[in-house]
Amino acid sequence: MLNSLDLETAPQDTRVVVAMSGGVDSSVTAALLKAEGYDVVGVTLQLYDHGAATHRKGACCAGQDIHDARAVAERIGIPHYVLDYESRFKEAVIDRFAESYVAGETPVPCVECNQSIKFRDLLGTARELGAKVLATGHYVASRRMADGSCALYRAREEERDQSYFLFATTQEQLDILRFPLGERTKAETRELARKFSLSIADKHDSQDICFVPSGHYADVIERLKPGAAEAGEIVDLAGNVLGKHEGIIHFTVGQRRGLGIAAASPYYVVRLDADRGRVVVGPREALRTRAIHLRDVNWLGDGSIDAALADDKLEVFVKVRSTRAPSPAWLRHSANGYEVELIEGEDGVSPGQACVFYDAREGQARVLGGGFIKTAVAAEIPARAMPLVAAAARG
């Protein structure tokens, strides 16, 4: 598979920096490119204090993972460097994660990590090392367009696709980035790891939020922001107090369990009112969202986003959560930026989440960009759900 990175230079004349997390995917990426003759340099980022996560399944970029990355680099015969990005990671990712949760949002720290740490800071390091490209083990595809630029596409294996977390990648970054695993399945990747005799062939996959050792977000937030878990009221859609809570950081939109409310029909968290410290609950139908207002929109489609919206709106498919399939929508201008109309509606949409656009003309394969959800506009509650709301209002 000669010159698989789609470069004009021959592999032996091309230096490639591979971001090695210590997992199977990035390790195989490095081994593949080394086998193809590229001048490969492995770089691992130490992102946080790894004491509590060193031996925990699902952690990454910590003690054991650094050791594993180093061992793989030695096995395949490439230089390997460990860079201390702990302070940068805390400021750009962990602190913002905590601030977002306190504000009643549902943040996606992996997007911020890719945007600010891996694809900005690490790209700068790659250039300093004389590399032409930076390769990662993400399951997403990069394809050369007719004008010479690169476009971002969903991975071949839908269950592994990570395009949701990469929507904020800029065009300049995309032209330098390469994703050799985008056209492979996870099973194929593990088989390659065994072929290359890599000790991490059967290593567990890392979890999305790597810096939460306990798996409990509230624990991390309370440690970073003492006093953030302020008690408040649980109210229904009419504003009636149904109970008390110990802090909105313990709740997420769509949550049903753990509310501590006795009712004939189940309640769900509909929204979090950070200003008043309230958790607003309602019937499942109240979770339905029909429109989304966005902030920090990034466009990766052809031309500009304004040109794409010249006819007032653009038919797209969108994801509002990484685990959901793309759903049909209209992208259009709004008074304060851009908005998405969800043709079929979506449940449990929360501010802070990402809304990623996919090209309807290319079978939802190409990533057109995306933005972060600023506000979600609820759909009208069906009449069949109104008796529950009315009963709550009567007390």
Image: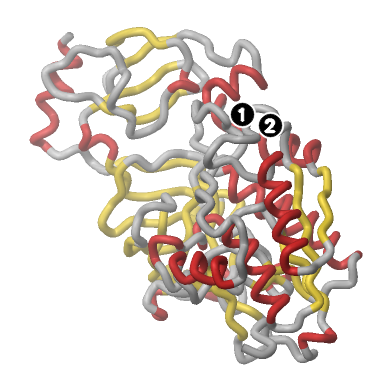
Label disc, if present, on residue 98 of the rendered structure: 1
55 left or right of 36 in image: left
395 left or right of 97 in image: left
Is the residue 177 above or below the residue 236 in the image?
A: below
The amino acid type of the residue labelled 1 equals Ala
- Which of 51 and 103 lies nearest the eye of the viewer? 51
Which image quadrant: the C terminus?
A: top left
Task: State the image coordinates of residue 123 (x, y, percent, origin top left).
Answer: 79, 62
- Which of 328 and 3 lies nearest the eye of the viewer? 3
Task: State the image coordinates of residue 32 (x, y, percent, origin top left).
Answer: 65, 75
Q: State the residue at coordinates (51%, 62%).
A: 163
Q: State the residue at coordinates (66%, 52%).
A: 22
Task: State the image coordinates of residue 336 (x, y, percent, origin top left).
Answer: 55, 50
| Distance from the alpha carbon under mark 1 to that under mark 2 | 5 Å
Task: State the image coordinates of residue 112 (x, y, percent, origin top left).
Answer: 64, 47
- Which of 175 and 171 lies nearest the eye of the viewer? 175
Is the residue 376 above or below the residue 27 in the image?
A: above
Q: Residues within 10 Å of mark 1 (few under 14, many from 20)?
A: many
What kind of element bears circle 1? helix
Query: Which residue in the structure is indicated by mark 2?
Result: 95
Which image quadrant: the N terminus?
A: bottom right
Residue 119: name its quadrant.
bottom right
